Image: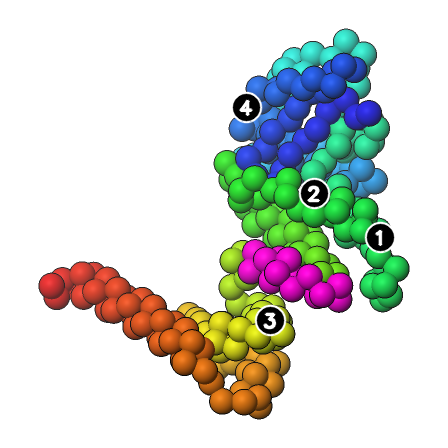
Amino acid sequence: MAGYVLKLMGPVILTRLSDLGGHTEVRLSRTSQALLALVALHGTNAPMSREAVAETLWPDTPSNKSRGRLSTALWRLRSAIADQGGNGPLAERGGWIGIAPESVVQVDIHELAWRVRSLPLADIDTWASADVAALEAAISARRGSFLAGIEGEWTYSARQTCADIYEAGLEALIRFHRHRGNLNRSIDAARRLVRDDPYREDIHAMLVELYALKGQRGRAISQYMNCRDLLHSDLGIGPGQALRASLDDVLGQQGLSGAELREIVRTMNRTIGLLARHVDDLRTLLGDR
């Protein structure tokens, strides 16, 4: 069992585990949190030089001062952990700093990445239910915005790295549950993905298809309209071919029922209400009340 758990899928938290199964959160400063998160995202096999760590964390500070800050941060981190056995979450050797092996510290985003990689890329029929359940548990470990509370130029790419891994996990769940006919679970995963990345037209198109498969054509058309309006209002573009094709498949069936038409009207009303609020906001900004 790992001695520590480092959580990056939300506020950065380091937890020390005991042999009896208990856990204690290690209180860390923002600097210590940032230091751990930075080296952890580089991975066990990709340590960083002390100079690179110092420059990344304090890019606008003269090198001699940033190196001094790093030495202080490392000392404070070791003091906070106070591990008598010397098995802390950081591994430092010869001027290189990395995250300790998985046997010492378990990192939630690494666990999720490993679960995604462990699934075969092609033959979905070979996916074991236990592996998918483990993937779902790893995805559920997210507690909010990645690296919440940590700031710095390096965090933009770091958060994108976390988001890419998280989305890959959700896409795997969408595919698996759709293949098994679990449409509700596939829809749930797809909706979680577009909440994080609302401009993913391919996932919107999949939602249109999934709603249609459930017989909810009104919801399918509403999903298309929501995405189309979002693309137009935020990006000034129209829907792509895949999204249009998903709607064509729905409309190629029999005519709309009364319930489907009512669902479309509700969607239109929500869109009109949103546009009205945008107009009011613009008028307020312009002083035209």
The residue that mark 3 highlights is: 214
- Local secondary structure at mark 4: loop
Circle nearer the viewer, 1 or 3: 3
- Alpha carbon distance from label 1 to label 3: 25 Å
Of mark 1 and mark 3, the one earlier in the sequence is 1
Residue 150, which numbered label?
none
Residue 29, which numbered label?
4
At 69% from the left and 38% from the top, the residue drawn is 108
Residue 137, which numbered label?
2
Residue 3 higher or lower than 41, as above or below: above
The answer, for residue 96, to whether it is visible in the render is no
Amino acid type, mark 2: Ala
The picture quadrant where one finds residue 7 is top right
Amino acid type, mark 4: Ser
The answer, for residue 128, to whether it is visible in the render is yes
Residue 128, which numbered label?
1
* Colour convention: rainbow
The magenta region covers 178-193
Amino acid type, mark 3: Lys
Residue 97 higher or lower than 283, as above or below: above
Q: Quadrant of the C terminus?
A: bottom left
**Callout 2: few (<14), some (14-19), or many (20+) C-alpha neighbours within 10 Å?**
few
Of mark 2 and mark 3, the one earlier in the sequence is 2
Of 288 and 1, nearer the camera is 1
At 66% from the left and 24% from the top, the residue drawn is 15
Circle nearer the viewer, 2 or 3: 3
284 in magenta? no
Query: Residue 206, percent across and down?
Result: 62, 71
Of 177 and 64, nearer the camera is 177
- Alpha carbon distance from label 2 to label 3: 26 Å
Query: Residue 207, percent across and down?
Result: 58, 69
Q: Are marks 2 and 3 in contact (CB under 8 Å)?
A: no
